[in-house]
């Protein structure tokens, strides 16, 4: 049985079959974003993952990757009272462009934009 944020996500995130191509199920979060109570509860649940037992933040920065990552990670960073680092793919616009490896973002780029190409 689903409870709390899991129930909200199940109810407010819509599956779109076959988008952007056959065999892919796109997760549409716009219903979640349109529901202030649901969005707030999901942000609070995500922020709780970045706190210790006393409620103190255990992270220095929250990293959000492209589009939906920006929308979700920025309010989580605010809730934790820590910085937010937007990460974009090479070729995208933005202040920092970080390289990617198959396993993910290079460790040196996490929370430290000095390893990224600075755009003016």
Image (cartoon, rainbow, N blue to C red):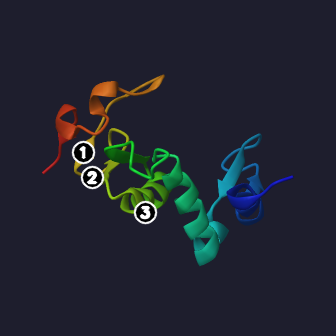
Residue 92's place in the image compared with 31, above or below, is: above
Label of residue 96 in the image: 1
Question: In the displayed structure, does residue 64 sit left or right of residue 30?
Answer: left
Label 2, secondary structure: give it: loop
Q: Are marks 2 and 1 in contact (CB under 8 Å)?
A: yes
**Which residue corresponds to the image point at 55% horizontal and 69% vertical from the top-left?**
40
Mark 2 to mark 1: distance in Å?
A: 6 Å
Q: Nearer the viewer, residue 65 or 91?
A: 65
Judging by the rendered image, the residue that carries numbered circle 3 is 75
The spot of residue 19 in percent (x, y) is 70, 51
Q: For mark 2, does the 10 Å Cα neighbourhood hold few (<14), some (14 to 19), or many (20 or more) residues?
A: some
Q: Height in image: 96 above or below 103?
A: below
Instruction: Tell me where residue 118 appears, x and y as whole percent.
Output: 16, 42
Image height check: is 107 above or below 51?
above
Q: Earlier in the sequence, mark 2 or mark 3?
A: 3
Mark positioned earlier in the residue sequence (3 or 1) = 3
Which numbered marker is on residue 120?
Answer: none
């Amino acid at each position: 049985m689903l409870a709390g944020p899991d129930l909200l996500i199940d109810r407010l995130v819509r599956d779109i079959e076959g988008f952007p191509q056959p065999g892919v199920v796109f997760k549409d979060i716009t219903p979640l974003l349109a529901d202030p109570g649901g969005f707030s509860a999901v942000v609070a649940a995500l922020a709780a993952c970045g706190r210790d037992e006393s409620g103190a933040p255990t992270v220095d920065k929250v990293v959000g990757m492209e589009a939906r990552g920006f929308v979700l990670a920025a309010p989580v960073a605010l809730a934790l009272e820590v910085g937010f680092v937007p990460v974009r793919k090479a070729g995208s616009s933005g202040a920092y462009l970080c390289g990617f490896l198959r396993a993910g973002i290079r460790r040196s780029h996490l929370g430290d934009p000095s390893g990224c190409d600075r755009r003016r």
